[in-house]
Amino acid sequence: MQDRLAVIEERLLERAGGQTELVTQAAQHIINAGGKRFRPVLVVLASHFGGEVDEEDLIRAALVVELTHVASLYHDDVMDDADIRRGAPSANRRWQNSVAILVGDFLFARASTTVAELGVDYVHLQAETFARLVHGQIAETIGPAEGEDPLAHYLDVVADKTGSLIATSALFGGMVSGASPEVLEALRQFGEDIGIVFQLSDDIIDITSDVTGKTPGTDLREGVPTLPTLLALRSTDPADARLQELIRSDLTEDADLAETIELLRRHPAIDEARAEVARRAGVARDRLGVLPEGPARTALEELCDQVVTRST
Ligand code: FPP
Ligand code: MG
Ligand code: MG
């Protein structure tokens, strides 16, 4: 695994090379800043459930999902007006919004070249995934429709903006190994589920952690609903009135944002959200039961546990 990840790392930087120094520098910026490489890891682990694997295709599949992910982060940081990403200045801060948007497009173009080398089935799936990512971001931006349950809307957003690409990562891994349709479906469903759990835990960490490599409370400041805030808003306890008023306000003042984070950190909504993450991770873990036992399945089970306990 470590050897493959090292190759993936090298190729990621290679694929991020552009025709000018600026494009190369800006495109490699977020890749160089770090990251968990969760999606490539999933591609590699999922490739153990079929037959023989073409090593180059496996690397290509891992590159496609990570390049797509990184591309989406450049755009996301513009949309969220983020200052930092992976502990480094976001591309929109280091350069400017238009550079960040275009470099995101450039990385997505490189993901497209790479997926074309894999074949039409992969291109099709990649295109569907891209559409879901975009729908998720748009739905998050627009918010729930009149009368729509905000929690259900939020979960749909999370499935589209994060579950989709993680499901595709698992599916790509299965596809490069020629896995059976049943195994492919189990991998896809597992990826979708663990992807949702991953984003739910990310949203909790946005409130609870000071060491994420991002600015705490970014979602709050941008008015992006998350599981803890939606649960806190549901409370009918009069003691929560101040917190609810703060969550609904625009939170442009640093002092207001700090107070909201403080109140939320002590609020039972955080424990409730954590319990939901643990419950959903358990469901995802159970889905692995249909896959053959072995080191790859154990590693996937461990991933489920790590998503629950992670703090960055
Ligand atoms: C991060 O959410 C954002 C995503 C997971 C999806 C972003 C998708 C797009 C911008 C559309 C697709 C674009 C391309 C080029 C593929 P977050 O803001 O909650 O996470 P964060 O805390 O990491 O910022
Ligand atoms: Mg963001
Ligand atoms: Mg966002």
Image (cartoon, rainbow, N blue to C red):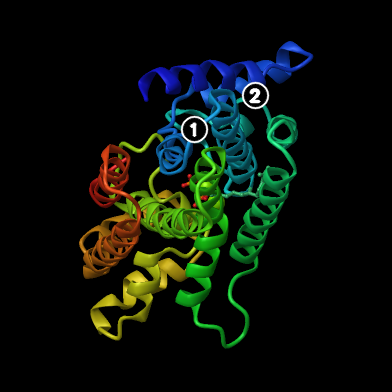
Residue 225, percent from left and from top: 47, 65
Q: Nearer the viewer, mark 2 or mark 1?
A: 1
Residue 283 in the image, given as x and y percentages of width and height? 31, 65
- Marks 2/1 in contact by CB < 8 Å: the verdict is no
**Residue 188 in picture, x, y percent from top left:** 49, 56
Q: Nearer the viewer, residue 301 or 174?
A: 174
Seen from the viewer's position, the closer of residues 44 and 177 is: 177
Type of amino acid at the residue the image marks with label 2: Ala
Numbered disc 2: secondary structure: helix
Q: Is mark 2 within 8 Å of ligand 1?
A: no
Q: Residue at x 44, y 21 (%)?
A: 4
**Inter-mark Cα distance, 2 to 1:** 33 Å
Viewer-side residue, 64 vs 185: 185
In the picture, the disc for residue 83 is none
Q: Residue furthest top?
A: 21
The kind of residue on which mark 1 rests is Glu
Tell me what residue is drawn at x 63 percent, y 54 percent.
Answer: 133
- State which quadrant residue 216 falls in: top left
Residue annotated with mark 1: 52
Tell me the residue at 46%/49% (across/down): 218
Q: Which residue is mark 2?
A: 27
Query: For numbered disc 1, what is the local secondary structure?
Result: loop
Q: Is residue 289 above or below residue 86?
A: below
Find the residue positioned furthest to the right.
Answer: 19
Q: Quadrant of residue 68?
A: top right
Residue 192 in the figure: left or right of residue 100: left
- In percent of width and height, residue 121 lies at 70, 47
Decide which of tag 2 and tag 1 comes sooner along the chain: 2
**Quadrant that contains the C terminus:** top left
